[in-house]
Each structure stands twice: as C-alpha cells, then as structure tokens.
Image (tube, rainbow, N blue to C red):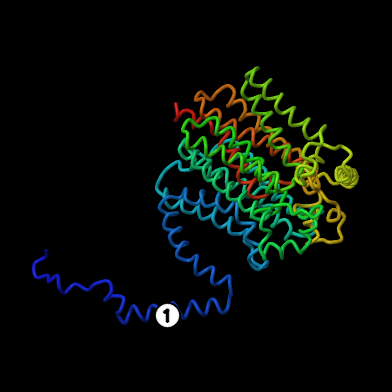
Amino acid sequence: MEKGHNQFDTVTGSEKLGSVKFVLLMLLITALSIGVITRMGIEGAMALIALPFILIYFYWLFRNPITGLWAAFVLDFVLLGIDRYLDTTIQVGLTMDIVLVLTYVAYIIKHFYDRGIWKPAKKDVTLLAAIWLGYSIMEFFNPQAQNHAAWFAAMRGISLYMMLIIPLVLLFIDNVKKLDTFFTIWGVFSILASLKGIVQIVAGPDPWEQQWLSTSAGQTHIIWGQLRAFSFMSDAGQFGANQAYTAVVAMIVAIAEKGRGRKLFFLLVTGFGLLGMALSGTRGAVVVPLAGFAYFLILRKSGAVMISGMMLLLLVFVFFKYTHIGQGNTFVRRMRTAFNPDDPSLQVRIENQKKLRVYLATRPFGGGIGLAGVKAKAYLPDAFLSNIATDSWYVMIWAEQGIVGLALHLFILFYIIIKGSVKIMFRIRDPILKLKMAALASGMMGVMVSSYGNAVLGTMPTSLLIYSSMALLLNSEKLDIQKT
C-alpha cells in the first residue's frame, strides 16, 4: 500500500455513479437519445442500440484488420434482407462498400511503415478483377446507357466487389486455420438462412415480409398458392441457388474434415442447404449440386469414384426427368419442371433471347450496365431492354455489356476455374487441402452452370463467396506450402 494512502477514503463505483457529473452525463445522453428517436423513428432507435457494438467493432478492426473481412462475410448473408425492415430510401447496400473500404484503411494504417504490404495480393486473379472493373467503368461512357444511376447501382455487384474482395482474401486468408474460419462462418449463416426459410414456410412470413410480398415480389414468390421461401436473402432464386451451392461445398469439406465434430457440422450444413434449396422452389438450383458433384468426380481422378458418382447423379436425373415420384409435393413438382424442355417458362426465355440477338447485333457493348431486365424499369420504364426479362446471368451480361463484355467475363471465369483445377489435380500435395479446394472449385462450377438459367452469380451472398473462392483457388499453392 502506498505511503499515506487511506484505503477507507477510496471512492467506490456506486459513489461514482451517484456523482453530479455522471448524473448530468446520463441526462444528456437520454435527451439526445429521445431526440434521435423522435426525429428518426425505428431507424434512430436501431442506430442507438448498434452504437456500442459499432465502437467495439472499430476497436477490433484497427487492431486486427481481418475483422473487416469476417464482418463482410456476415453482412453478405443478411444485408439485402435487412432492407425489408427499413425505409426503402436507405441504401443498405452501401454498408458493404463502407465495411470493405474501412478494412483497407485499417490494413494500411496497421502496416503503414511496412514494405511490400501488397505483395500477397499481386496475383493474376487480382489483375483479372482489375481488368473486369476497368471494362465496367468504360461502360459508364457507353452511348447506349441513358441512365448513370443504374450503372452505379448494378456495377458494384458485377465488378466492384470482385475488385475489393479478392485482394483482401489474398492478404488475410493466408493459412489453413483462417480458411477453416471462412468455411465455419459460411456454414453457420447458411444454417441460419435455412432455419429462417423453414419458419417462413411453417409459420408464414412476418408482417414486414408480408408487406414485401404484397408488391410485385408476390407474383414470383407465391406459386400455385404455395409460398417460396426466401429467408433473409434478396429473393427465393438467390436463396435456393446459394443453399444448393453451400450444400456442394459443405459435403466435400465434410469428407475432408478429420475431426468428428467438424465433420458432423458440415454434414448438418449440407442437409440444411439441400432443404433450403427445396423450400425455395427454385428450379434452376437443382442444377448446382448436379454440376458441382459431377465436377468434383472429375477432380478426384479416380475411375471407381467417378463411375459410382456418375451413377448416383444419373439416378437423381432419372428421378426428376422420368418419374412422377413425389409429384404431390409442390417443391418437387416445381423443381421437376427444370428438366422439361417444353416448359412454357423455358420457351419464353428462348423467345426473349431471339429478340435480344437481333437488338444486340449492332450493339457490341450492350445497352448499359443496370439497364436490362425487370430491374431496369425503375430507371427507363419504356426502353426496349427494360421490357425483356433476362433471367440468365449470362444473358444479362450480354444485354448490358454486349458480346465483348460477355466474352471477357466468360474468359475470366474459365481461366480461374481451369487454372484452379490444374492446381488441385496436379500441384497441391496435402490431401485435406486438396479436398477443400476441390469443394470451392466444384461449388463455383455448379454456380457457373446454374447461372445460365438464373441471375445468381453477381448477387449477395453468392457473389462474395464466389469472388473469395476465386482468390483462394489461385492462391492454393501458398496455403499448401505452409501446410506441408
């Protein structure tokens, strides 16, 4: 004890709480809170509740910048769904932009005096992302583009997030432990997404979701009187495709995991993913596991595994194509239509593509980013492209960025998937890492094939997961060196 210090004179915590300064501070905070809630309503109340967590987040972000990347993956799942509970004038999508940019700021500040801080990000996949972003920026000056607000809203998902996410993944996910954290976050929020979808089907949508369904969204989310689950994602199509994508990745990761706990966890993720796919009623989503697992069999380079796996996939195809088993179930019946070449919806898509082929014959750079399909009605309601449903991701790229943009986009996708596959098949030595990379490649291939029928590749959460997979696939040799 310090000389001259009387322990009985120490001011206790309760006495400090009763001081005049503390009381005045509490009164000031209360008055400000009341003022914020009065002026901003529920948004203001939510902001006040979130404020302490935001301050804690900033502390951890600047102390350990990878926090920003983990936060981006969390927001990736829930951000678009939050919009249903807030005023539509609030641009919740900008939150992702802010989180990613602040992550770069935190990384720069933390490594301000370090040399070569960007060296891990100097990869061909980063260059490809930069080229694709550059092409999207050039589309701003497309003479066919008559509304630049549409360009700003759409190009973020198409190319900006790709440019922001890929370097961060290369910088931060530089060992297998962080790779496992990435898979865990993905799995946890996929389970939560499926649980939310189950609640929507069993208990019905909540009041905010019901209000959303009362708009034009209800036309595509209530089929034959049955609600299609959309969880907390943008729509049922994205929910179904992403859960199918997750199921492919999780199943292969489960094979790779040696620990019983993590193996069971990823098997659980697989089951919930397939259930979410079914509850979404998204026909094109069934293509994801078919194409994904077929590609996994190719990556395994085993004749016996390939034959047995192909037989299983063939049985699934026969089930949907040539039987009527489960036809009484709404979700099975709807997915079965994906295997019907005479389906009216498919015929409409083919006719729309014929119209686009004539229109785009003289427009090699397309009609402008964000200005094709139903979404474009908000910007140019009477334009030709606004009244042609694009449906397919590739058709949308073709309509908005022309044959030049589509060719560049396909080149980037196939360059990454082929080079990543070569690394998996011939260069990665660690068998567990080989399987985990095969999971990412197989899931990516499933999404690429499915994107011919649905515009899912560039929408959250699938988009950020795909962009992260691109970076990890082309950085897999570095992870392998550290592991072995």
Say which amino acid is labelled 1: Leu
Which quadrant would the C terminus be assigned to in this image? top left
Q: In the displayed structure, would residue 197 be above or below residue 256?
A: below
Q: Nearer the viewer, residue 91 or 193?
A: 193
Query: Left or right of 267: which side holds 152?
Result: right
Q: Nearer the viewer, residue 110 or 421?
A: 421
| Secondary element at tag 1 | helix
Question: Is the residue marked by circle 1 packed among few (<14), some (14-19), or many (20+) residues within 10 Å?
Answer: few
Q: Residue at x 56, y 40 (%)?
A: 268
The residue identified by callout 1 is 28
Q: Residue at x 35, y 80 (%)?
A: 23
Q: Residue at x 71, y 46 (%)?
A: 456
Query: Left or right of 85: which side holds 109?
Result: left
In terms of image quadrants, where is residue 424? top right
Query: Left or right of 79: which side holds 121?
Result: left
Location of residue 463 in the rendering, given as x and y in whole percent from the top left corner? 64, 46
